[in-house]
Amino acid sequence: MSKLLKSIIFIIFLPLLIISCKSPDGKFKLPGGDARKFPADPAKRVEQNLKEGRGFRLSEMNKRSGVFDFASSNELWRASLDVIDFMPLSSVNYSGGIIITDWYSDKSSPNESIKISIRFLTNEIRSDALDIKVFNRKCSDTLLNCNFTEISGNLVTELKKEILKKASKYKTNSDVDYKYPKGLNK
């Protein structure tokens, strides 16, 4: 029954589809440009397309290029990496503006570890430029039975303060060479 219904609908709409391919003068018109309206010389075609706004030139690309800020020239980014230098990094995405460390624990308490997430809200050195989150993981016996909590308060404030202090030093001493943390190359 449904095949019959589909066939009837197809038969009804097929003539409508074919009729819609006609131009207003009643002739069938294939899609695409009319070769008689465009010059045969490629250089003249390019010029005509540019006049009509249908193209671009690679030589014009340099005129419209933006300003790119790289990680090594961003003081806030560099300071953040320096402050958390002792921790292994899990994800570092400069274009996304986020640094996430892996779980870190010192040898004195192997069942407790922390993880830091730093999100950059702006490149300016301001107190509201960073969104820092610190997570704590406490495990009993094995890594299968763990409790996760977000730490707020003094540790987050101290991290932010230290990063902003280092960033402002980098800003004033911009001629000092930057040393990348372990594992990151230029």
Image (cartoon, rainbow, N blue to C red):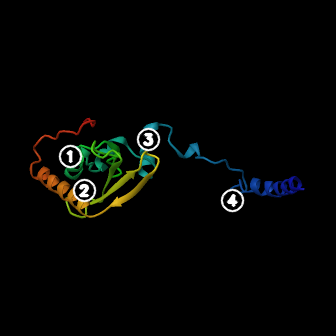
Quadrant including the C terminus: top left
Residue tagged 2 = 123
Residue 98 seen by the camera: no
Q: CA distance from mark 4 to mark 2?
A: 58 Å
- Amino acid at circle 4: Pro
Gap in Å between the C-alphas at discs 4 and 3? 30 Å
Q: Considering the image in quadrants, where does the N terminus appear?
A: bottom right
User: Pointer 2: residues within 10 angstroms few (<14), some, or many (20+)?
Assistant: some
Report x, y in % for residue 66.
29, 50
Number of marks in picture: 4
Q: Residue 70 is drawn in which quadrant?
A: top left
Q: CA distance from mark 4 to mark 1?
A: 70 Å
Mark 1 lies on residue: 82
Q: Is residue 149 left or right of residue 16?
A: left
Q: Identify residue type, mark 1.
A: Asp
Q: Are marks 2 and 3 in contact (CB under 8 Å)?
A: no
Q: Position of residue 38 (x, y in %)?
A: 52, 44
Q: Residue furthest front?
A: 141
Mark 3 residue type: Lys
Q: Which mark is residue 44?
A: 3
Q: Helix, strand, or loop for circle 4? A: loop
Instruction: Locate residue 183, reporting x and y percent.
Output: 28, 36
Q: Earlier in the sequence, mark 4 or mark 3?
A: 4
- Residue at image coords 41%, 44%: 47
For the residue marked with disc 2, what is the amino acid?
Asn
Comparing marks 4 and 2, which lies closer to the viewer? Answer: 2
Compared across the picture, whether 15 is left or right of 83 comes to: right
The circle on residue 24 is 4
Q: How far apart are labels 2 and 3 at the CA level? A: 46 Å
Could you say whether the residue bearing mark 3 is in a helix, strand or loop?
A: helix
**Residue at (37, 43) in percent of width and height:** 57
Residues marked 2 and 1 touching at CB (< 8 Å): no
